[in-house]
Image (cartoon, rainbow, N blue to C red):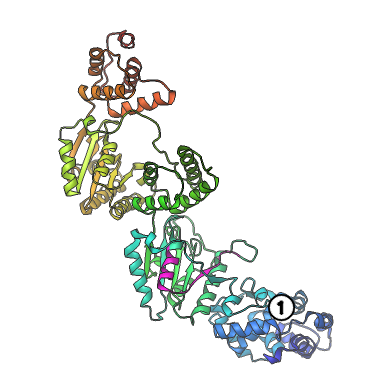
Amino acid sequence: MCGYKHFYSKLLSSKLRRIAPSDLAEIMQLEIDESDPAVLTKLMIQAQKLEQKLSILNPGFNGVIAINLKKLKSTLGLSKMDALLLGFFVLVKSNDDFEDVVDSIGEITFQQLVEVLSVVLGESKKDISQSLDGKSILAQSGLLKVDMRHSNNLSSKVDLLAGLEDVLTIESGNPIELLSRYFYPSTAPSLSLENYPHLAEETERVMRYLSHQRKRKGANILVYGPPGTGKTEWVKAIAKTLKFPLYEITSEDKDGDVLLDGRRVEIYKLAQHALQKRAKSLVMFDEVEDVFPHSISLFMERKSQSGNKGWINKVLEENPVPAFWISNSIRQIDSAYIRRFDLVIEIDTPPRSVRCEIIQNALQGVDVSQGWIHQLADHKQLVPAVISRAAKVVQTIAKPDEPQESIQNHMLTLINATLEAQGHSSLELKNLKTGLGYSLDYVNTDVDIEQLVKGMQYSQRGRFCLYGLPGTGKTAFGNFLAKALDRPLLIKRASDLLSPYVGVAEQNIARAFKEAKREGAVLQIDEADSFLQSRENAVRSWEVTQVNELLTQMESFEGVFIASTNLMKNIDQAALRRFDFKLEFKPLKTEQAWSMIEEIFRQYEIHQYDRDSIWETLKSMKVLTPGDFSAVMRKLSIGGILPEPGTLLSALEQECQFKPGYVKRTGIGFMSELSH
């Protein structure tokens, strides 16, 4: 490096001045009079001006640049020519005057660039060409990229890794610290692997895989799942447990602006080269949704900014350092790329038991009820990150003597604001008094439902088809059964599973069964007639494939599956044969409706009423269901109205009058009698 002491003066006062007009004309393919020195006039004037500033600028390779180049040379295995060229272009990019001097040569091709550099640096064209080649370390590490196809100015001909000229002109410690703008040691995880009991198998598999790498190239792990499910923390926890250094690829430039995906790929390649000699290192490449070239649709081709799609194959096959690639979604990634990953791990919302534990840990010292926590944990869209942030805010704003209900409202408001901003539905927790609780006494079926539930507690498996009028308690029975079996309930509605895109509904059905298996949940699909329509009447192919997919999943599912429908006659007959029980939920018997009336009067301490008149009125309501009672009690509770006999029965009849099978009551005037 000692030859760089008078780099500027050597370059400008000696080398460029020694270029004869004929040589420059040949390099630049110019047609000029060999005796006319005008071609070099501007260049020589600029060179003289720059020489006057050398004593002030003093950016020679003897200083910081030389030291940093030595660090890079050792870390990345650069040749002397690599370091020389890198230093030259760093000086070009970091000084406007120098850039003006070299650009005064004009537009040049790649071959002309090699010629000019050979004359300027006094090095062989062969060595220069090899260092600038696309297969060189400079190119493969992402430090330097040459435009091979177009003619342009010398400073534009070569593109340095963003910010490299700043990095090499600033004092730093070890080589990794020198490159810390691009990648850096990951921070300690805030969670441990104990917080991921639902990923025990995946964790064990990944740790064994990484422990036995033996420096094999192309070790890549794809981790994906919804935002906030703890993907990054899980990777950090694995690295910490293995005691392997983990390095993160930056997503921002020096000004805090988001880097384009192509730039991030260059940085990833740099990290791979820089870390390959560091034992047991790992790389974490987060938020890679747009890094991959997109799949080609039938209508248009979407291209990734990272360039030609061919780069990814090489990147995934030749990386010397094992890498975690983290993404919120993989739908836009071509399956040809996905299959090149050694391990593909999906991290979805944790199961209910884990969500409950996360909420309890996050709200330690905050006055909330256990029942409220359990209600909150029932909602699958509530991911750990949303819980933790809301809890942090509540712990800050809650007053020491603030009522429990107020604190719970704070928490729910914060959570719902985030969920709605993410496009999810807000959470609705049961906090209104309805006067009724669920009881099998209010279920009207032809089967001994209590005995059936007892048998299920022993067997822990079964397939049920529940059908009947809306409000007869089909969905509520699923919740009751899940609690009786001490299992979480996973409810999927048609809107959750159906999709306008061919094949996606089948994927959603398979994913629902997979999720139920993972959580050990009772799986209930409401509006099942949307998926189990008779295949004999199918018009489109996907109507058949949806039925086939659901039947296939039912066959292999070893847990408890419930399908509920209001349209039994539309169900495929082959599907019906696969259900162990087909239970019709009928409207309430008169004695069941009377029991519900008595329960309400008891809770509200209403003692004056005409039993016989009420009984006769209930007998006329042939389509009355438990859902009608719940709807009426909510309505009265919101309005602050007591469920007086006349008011209650009138409201119940209004719920019934729009149902099929409703017969209008005769005998006007009895309502006034009941209310006195």
Magenta stretch in the rendered image: 234-252
Residue 444 quadrant: top left
Foreground residue among 599 and 233? 599
Q: Is residue 243 magenta?
A: yes
Label 1: element kind: helix
Q: Residue placed at 20% from the left, 52% from the top?
A: 555
Q: Quadrant of the N terminus?
A: bottom right
Q: Position of residue 360 (x, y in %)?
A: 41, 50
Closer to the camera in the image, 426 or 33:
426
Q: Position of residue 635 (x, y in %)?
A: 40, 25
**Disc 1 crowd, CA 10 A, few/some/many (<14, 14-19, 20+):** many
Query: Foreground: 210 or 356?
Result: 356
Question: Quick check: is 437 in the magenta stretch?
Answer: no
Q: Amino acid at mark 1?
A: Val
Q: Residue at 27% x, 51% y: name it.
A: 549
Task: Determine which residue is flagged by label 1.
Answer: 92
